[in-house]
Image (tube, helix red, strand yellow):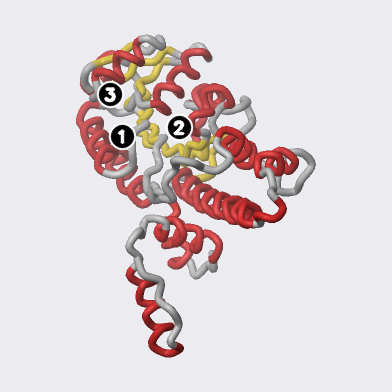
Amino acid sequence: MELGMVGLGRMGANMAERLLRGGHKITGFDPNADARKAAQGRGIAPTDSLQALVEALPAPRVVWLMVPSGKITDDSVDALLLLLAAGDTVIDGGNSNYKDTLRRAKLYADKGLGYVDSGTSGGVWGLKEGYSMMIGGDEKTVAALRPIFETLAPGKDQGWGRVGPVGSGHFTKMVHNGIEYGLMQAYAEGFSILEHKKDFALDLSQIAEIWRYGSVVRSWLLDLTADALKKNPTMAGIAPYVVDSGEGRWTVAEAIDLDVPAPVITLSLIERLRSRDNESFSDKLLSAMRNEFGGHEIKKE
């Protein structure tokens, strides 16, 4: 099968290479010339514009978007809307907000274009291990794209599936990432407790390795944690600053809208926000309060 890949960054290029290995032909576009050059070295045929990409693809065209959520996705979707013809399909494999996906899909449907959302997980390991894909879209359209998903997935019938109509793929991936926040926070807190028990002189890397086999907390995320601890047992040189890409916030907002209690995911998001507050006014004020009512000592900067 022949398709276009928009976005030749690390994940997009890795996905394109996995598709190439599976016998698909890939034509790609990225506004960054260096990314296009690197992609060409991996066997991807690069183009220097979206228009050139569309012109290079046979009809009916399939274009996979692998770009950051927000404005870049909107700009790409709007541009392709003017370039594609009835019967063509766009797959959004990025982390778009499902509400944006619903809006974009309607614009495409009005012009006879297909729009499929693929919540995609796998990160930098996807090239080797395969990608987990939660797909939303029309049943017939998704069925026609099956060879693409089978090639990208860990197995033909493993790690991917149509979860519902358009929008449901990104919605499911949003919740997936919210769960990820909670799992990561639990591991981080547990290992922090172990690290602070200095009189036992615990080897965190060893403990992570023990837990990887037979333990009820074993997981791929623990495998990665064990690898990180082996490389850098004290986390030296790493700032205690944790970013978030948006999905956790969207998950918490959706939980509130649906009246669903989600304290673990919510608190894990709050912890990420807290990690960025090097000058915490609230903590300073708490210290001042304790001094006011109890005469407790204030630690000076």
Check disc 3 and report its element: helix, strand or loop: loop
Three-letter amino acid code of the residue under disc 2 = Thr
Three-letter amino acid code of the residue under disc 3 = Asp
Q: Is 113 on the left or on the right of 138, as rendered?
A: left
Viewer-nearest residue: 38 or 20? 38
Viewer-nearest residue: 223 or 14? 223
- First in sequence, mark 2 or 1: give its number: 1
Residue 58 visible (yes or no): no
Residue lying at 33% horizontally and 38% vertically, measured from the top left: 68
> Which residue lies under the disc numbered 3?
30
Q: Furthest-bottom residue in view?
A: 293
Up-down relation of residue 30 to residue 281 (above or below)? above
> Which residue lies under the disc numbered 2?
141
Viewer-nearest residue: 252 or 212? 212
In three-dimensional space, the C-alpha distance between marks 2 and 3, rounded to whole angstroms, equals 26 Å
> Which residue lies under the disc numbered 1?
112
Q: Is 259 on the left or on the right of 192, as rendered?
A: left
Residue lying at 36% horizontally and 15% vertically, measured from the top left: 39
Label 1: few (<14), some (14–19) or many (≥20) C-alpha neighbours in 10 Å: some
How far from the left and from the top, in percent, is residue 155?
63, 26
Check disc 2 and report its element: helix, strand or loop: helix
Q: Is 118 on the left or on the right of 75, as rendered?
A: right
Residue lying at 45% horizontally and 22% vertically, measured from the top left: 14
